[in-house]
Amino acid sequence: MLTIHPQLGSLLRAANYSSLRHQVLSRNLANVNTPNYQREDVEMAEPSPASSAGPQDLSTSGLRIVKVDSPSMRSDGNNVDIDAEIGAIQQNAMAYQTVTQLMSSHLDSMRRAIRGS
């Protein structure tokens, strides 16, 4: 059975969250002019105690895409604000970069511990 260090598992879930969120935010941007399109976002649920007992699919565990109920300021019913989406994409990109740097640092320290240096 493959076990993942808890910190590395958390970083992997954060990276998967950021990756999926980028896809969803990009889809929002692509549909900025689609009538009646409703903005979507990603929610991350807390892992249940039962799921921690055995192996998990860390790629999608606890992630779900949800429609965002916000009033539309446009007459076509679309509630996507292009400026807000671009800002969210930039913020998400910075979060993803931070997570990948932390993962790299964690793996590097594990590599050094294994080598004994």
Image (cartoon, helix red, strand yellow):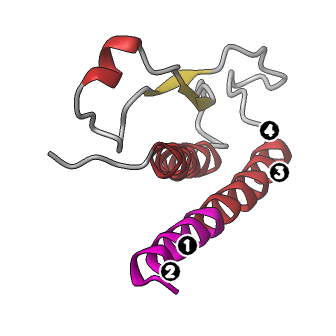
Q: Quadrant of the N terminus?
A: top left
Q: Are marks 4 and 3 in contact (CB under 8 Å)?
A: no
Q: Estimate the spatial distance between the alpha carbons at disc 3 and disc 2, rounded to whole Å.
A: 38 Å
Look at mark 4 in the image and give the residue it sits on: 81
Look at mark 1 in the image and give the residue it sits on: 109
Q: Are marks 3 and 1 in contact (CB under 8 Å)?
A: no
Q: Is residue 2 left or right of residue 52?
A: left
Magenta-colored stretch includes residue 52 = no
Mark 1 or mark 4, which is nearer to you? 1
Question: Could you classify mark 1 by the number of other residues whose Cα lies within 10 Å: few (under 14), some (14-19), or many (20 or more)?
Answer: few
Q: Is residue 48 left or right of residue 43?
A: left
3 or 1: tag closer to the N-terminus: 3
2 or 4: tag closer to the N-terminus: 4
Q: Estimate the spatial distance between the alpha carbons at disc 1 and disc 2, rounded to whole Å.
A: 5 Å
Inspect the image, locate mark 3, and give the three-letter code of the amino acid beneath it: Gly
Q: Estimate the spatial distance between the alpha carbons at disc 3 and disc 1, rounded to whole Å.
A: 33 Å
Look at mark 2 in the image and give the residue it sits on: 112
Q: Are marks 1 and 2 in contact (CB under 8 Å)?
A: yes
Residue furthest left in the image: 1
In the foreground, 111 or 51 = 111
Look at mark 3 in the image and give the residue it sits on: 87
Mark 3 or mark 1, which is nearer to you? 1
Magenta range is 101-117
Q: Are marks 3 and 2 in contact (CB under 8 Å)?
A: no
Magenta-colored stretch includes residue 112 = yes
Name the element at disc 1: helix
Q: Quadrant of residue 43?
A: top right
Question: Percent from the top left, x then y, of residue 29?
Answer: 64, 49
Residue 46 lies, with reference to residue 86, above or below; the image says above
